[in-house]
Image (spheres, helix red, strand yellow):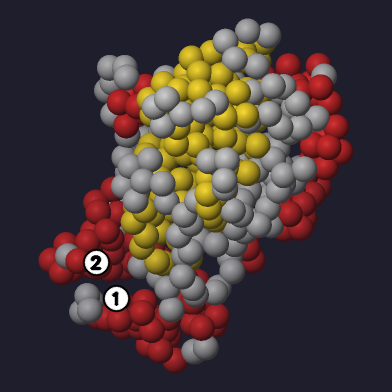
Amino acid sequence: MDRLANTVRPYAWGSTTAIPRLLGVEPTGEPQAEMWMGAHPGAPSRTPRGPLTEVIDAAPERELGTGAVARFGPRLPFLLKLLAAGAPLSLQVHPDLTQAGEGYEDEERRGVPADAPHRNYKDANHKPELICALTEFDGLCGFRAPLEAAALLSALEVDSLKPYVDLLHAHPEEAALREVLTAVLTADPGPMASTVTEAAAACARLGGAHAPYAGIAHHYPGDPGVIAAMLLNHVRLQPGEALFLGAGVPHAYLNGLGVEIMANSDNVLRCGLTPKHVDVPELLRIVRFEAGDPGVLRPEASPDGEEVYETPIDEFRLSRYVLPEGGPAQDLTRRTPQILLCTEGSVRTGDHTLAPGDSVFVPAGEEAHVTGSGTLFRATVVA
């Protein structure tokens, strides 16, 4: 079992205080957006035996287990993060496995450089993800019903939005959402910026259900993604609640601190709220134009105290333990690789005492017993 030293990524949308507060350190004044735990080549965790990527490469079956290697290959198939949003992230979707494979092969065949700003597919993998709130957490997830989106836009009384309102009323669900998103993202930038400015002022004036979009527009003035965001469900998670984001589901995180886990991929197609490349035709190929409830997840408790966040994919499995003072030791030994992350209190496993923000990598089959008082998240795979 190895204690992990993890990299904090200073993306501009990151909170300046949330991760330092959890770690019990002084803020630097700079954004601290994500702390990565795992073996992603972009920022692998460091162990006493070297970078976790090299530890796994040296003996994948010993570290990951024969079952996980047979199913997912000789690499850790998930990435665990602390995510701290101080401003909205880009509005985005992720491809499924087939779409990612096709997109990656096409860009490789066309010779698009791996670091090109207009490259969509960094790898051939999908990127389902789960975010679990540690604080109150705001996000956007999936499409509203077209009539609900029409009512939200209509209440703004912005003349240039009326064609979108009419489309949302006039077509079946999938066609309505597709046509309006396409129209918003392909609109002339000048008039669209004016529309966004007028809509943002109306959102600020109306408040209530419109208030989040005024906040988004404050960070991204004139961005068509502000109007696109109004087509989506706004969700406010309470601590312990989670969202699962599958392929093709448009989403954005707005504010808050959470534990995020995802398949080990960098494939993102952006819809707006970003200065980065937006490939509208490819985006429209990937988005699932289906309205529905965002589906807030609450953990399901098992008799041994493990609380599991159930998802339909196997590359990751996230659960948590809320350990009471003086409670019995929990046996977390598994035949799959694990990362254990403490987010509250003090937890002891093996020779390691974990404070909030501390984490360890547990190789497959390695004995792991946990004691203490606090909250511990467990990331592993289904194999």
Label 1 crowding class (10 Å Cα cut-off): few <14, some 14-19, many 20+? some
Q: Give the camera-side residue of 60 and 33.
A: 60
Circle 2 SS class: helix
According to the picture, the residue beneath numbered tag 2 turns out to be: 210
Circle 1 SS class: helix
Q: Is residue 333 above or below residue 303?
A: above
Looking at marks 2 and 1 on the same chain, the residue that comes earlier in the sequence is marked by 1
Q: Classify residue 336 by image quadrant.
A: top right
What's under tag 2, amino acid-wise? His
According to the picture, the residue beneath numbered tag 1 turns out to be: 152
Residue 359: image location, x then y, percent? 53, 22
Quarter holding the N terminus? top right
Q: Is residue 57 above or below residue 186?
A: above
Query: Position of 41 compared to 149: left or right?
Result: right
Give the residue drawn at x 57%, y 35%: 378
Quarter holding the C terminus? top right
Residue 314: image location, x then y, percent? 71, 48
Residues at circles 2 and 1 in contact by the CB criterion of under 8 Å = yes
What's under tag 1, amino acid-wise? Leu
Label 2 crowding class (10 Å Cα cut-off): few <14, some 14-19, many 20+? many
Give the residue drawn at x 27%, y 81%: 154
Q: Classify residue 46 by image quadrant.
A: top right
Residue 222: image location, x then y, percent? 30, 57
Work out how far the residue at label 2 is from the one at label 1, CA to CA, in angstroms. 7 Å
Q: Confirm whether residue 30 shows in the render.
A: no
* Residue farthest bottom in this picture: 170
Give the residue drawn at x 64%, y 23%: 368
Q: Give the camera-side residue of 140 and 353.
A: 353
